[in-house]
Image (cartoon, helix red, strand yellow):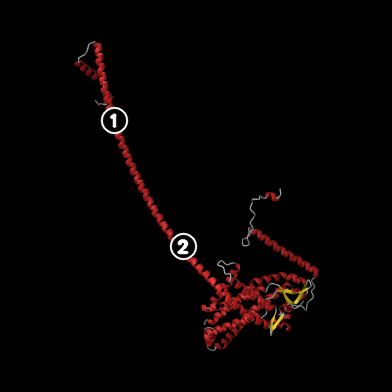
Amino acid sequence: MSAIATTSPAAPAPRAPAAHEPPANPEAAKRRRRRILWGVTLIWIIGFVVFGAAFGLKGHKNNKFEFIQPYHLETWAHIAGPIDFNKGVLYLLIAAALTVGLTVWVAYRMQRRPGRVQMIVEWMYDLSMRLSRDNIENPQMALRWFPVIFTLFVFILFTNLIGYIPLPINTGDTFKLFGAQIPAFQIYAADTNVALPLVLALGVFIAYNAVGLKAQGVRGYLKSLIPQGVGGKMLIFIFPLEVISHFLRLLSLTIRLWANLLAGHLLIDFMAGAMAVLLGLQLIGWLTLPIGVAIYLFEWVLIAGLQAFIFAILTAIYLGGATSRH
Amino acid sequence: MQPLAGIISAPIASSSNSWLITPNVGLTIWTLVVFAICLFILSKVAFPRIRKALDDRRLTISESIDAAQRTREEAERLLAEYRERLAEARQQAEQIVQRARQTAEAHAHEAQADVEARRQHLLEQTRREIEAETRRSIGQIRREVADLTVMATEKVTRRALTEEDQKRLVEDALAELDFETLTGGVR
């Protein structure tokens, strides 16, 4: 008897489990995961052997290849003076469009029972509001500076997130497809250029100092820089140090964001093939590829959000610190 | 093989790559302008709407919580009242049952007494009727005994008896009969 014949037509069709439901059999899911892991490992080992057999173990160093070149901003279109249109600007505009587009889109469709997208925007709104209120004592001040903290957080977050999507934007290196010269694919983030973090950090630096000066006056603000209990001759050493530390905030804000993103991108590039090209050893590329994937996931899942959060919370802390008298 | 650090640092450190640590002036201006526009649009368009929606929701949730609290208090009050009434009803029911039981018992006693009285009355009546019937029967027997005695004597003696003889004969005959067993002492 065939399988179809044994199945009663009246029998209900088995219900497909929804995505959010836990698997019916955890053991089966575990086995499946293990099989996938073993499969990937096997493919990697086979690839390793194939690469080794096909290309050998002897490399030849490539002196022409500069793996940081894709991060150079090549002018795509000149606008005026020093203002060009390049991939940095493109990514900046995409991040800005996503920041504004998503927030405004949700703002115009606020539902009493929020969907997923609305929940994400509300979560970002709530987080920024908490950052602002928890760190700035004056509630009115907290409310006034909330938009800056939200915009910084979301803008940097989108800048970072889109920075891990490989797109054909490397105009310095092209490939042919059906006779057309296509820019090579690369991962790029606008904040891998120091200009973006510097401008944002400079804005924060100017803002919190201006707020401090306005709230406490020049004398009061300068006095607030001195830690409690420090006086007399110690001031000669401490005060300059405190002033320098304030300027270092500008540098640390800038370099933290810029270096994290640039280093992350370079590491991914390096592990995903750049090292193999540099050494002229294909096997190395296959060997380091899993590490590249791991770093890629780590950067996208953790670093992108974490750096945005750190920038936003430090902004709130600096603004709060500038207005409170210690 | 050149050390790894050398491979990485060489292209970055070379003077031709100083652009890496030099801010791009154009991008600086772009960033300033784009961020300012973002901040302006969001402040004017998005945040007031989101804030209003969240405040409305907060208010709705607060009202819902208050309403739920009020409903709960009302429910608790009703429950307490219901329990109180239930207890009262139980008490009343017990009282009713108790009273009914007492009434039933009283009725039962009364009925029993009534039945007893009626039984006694019927017994008395029956007894009286039996006595009357017995007397009537005895009278009839006496009469029949007298008649038979007279008739028998006349047949034996072949002459008519005088009234005085008849009276004497009947009395003698009746005197010999024992009516005690029939009447139980009643004459």
Dot 2: element: helix
Residue at x 36% of width, y 48% of height: B98
Which label sits on residue B71? Answer: 2
Residue at 32% over, 41% down: B110
User: Picture coordinates of residue A243 (x, y %)?
Assistant: 58, 86
Residue A302 locus on image (x, y percent): 64, 72
Dot 1 falls on a residue whose secondary structure is: helix
Q: Quadrant of the N terminus of chain B?
A: bottom right
Which residue is located at x 59 percent, y 83 percent? A206
Is residue A254 or residue A14 the one in the foreground? A14
Q: Which quadrant of the view contains residue A181?
A: bottom right
Of the two numbered discs 2 and 1 on the same chain, state the one appearing first in sequence: 2
Residue A254 seen anywhere in this rendered image of the structure: no
Marking on residue A273 = none
B102 or A94: nearer the viewer: A94
Q: Which image quarter holds the C terminus of chain B?
A: top left
Q: How many marks?
A: 2
Give residue B51's position: percent from left, percent from top: 54, 73
- Asked whether, in this view, residue B110 is left or right of residue A198, the answer is left
Instruction: Answer whether residue A297 is visible to the viewer in this image.
Output: yes
Q: Is residue B119 above or below residue A214?
A: above
The image quarter containing residue A288 is bottom right
Q: Chain for mark 1?
A: B
The image quarter containing residue A183 is bottom right
For residue A233, side relative to residue A279 (left or right):
left
Numbered label attached to residue B127: 1
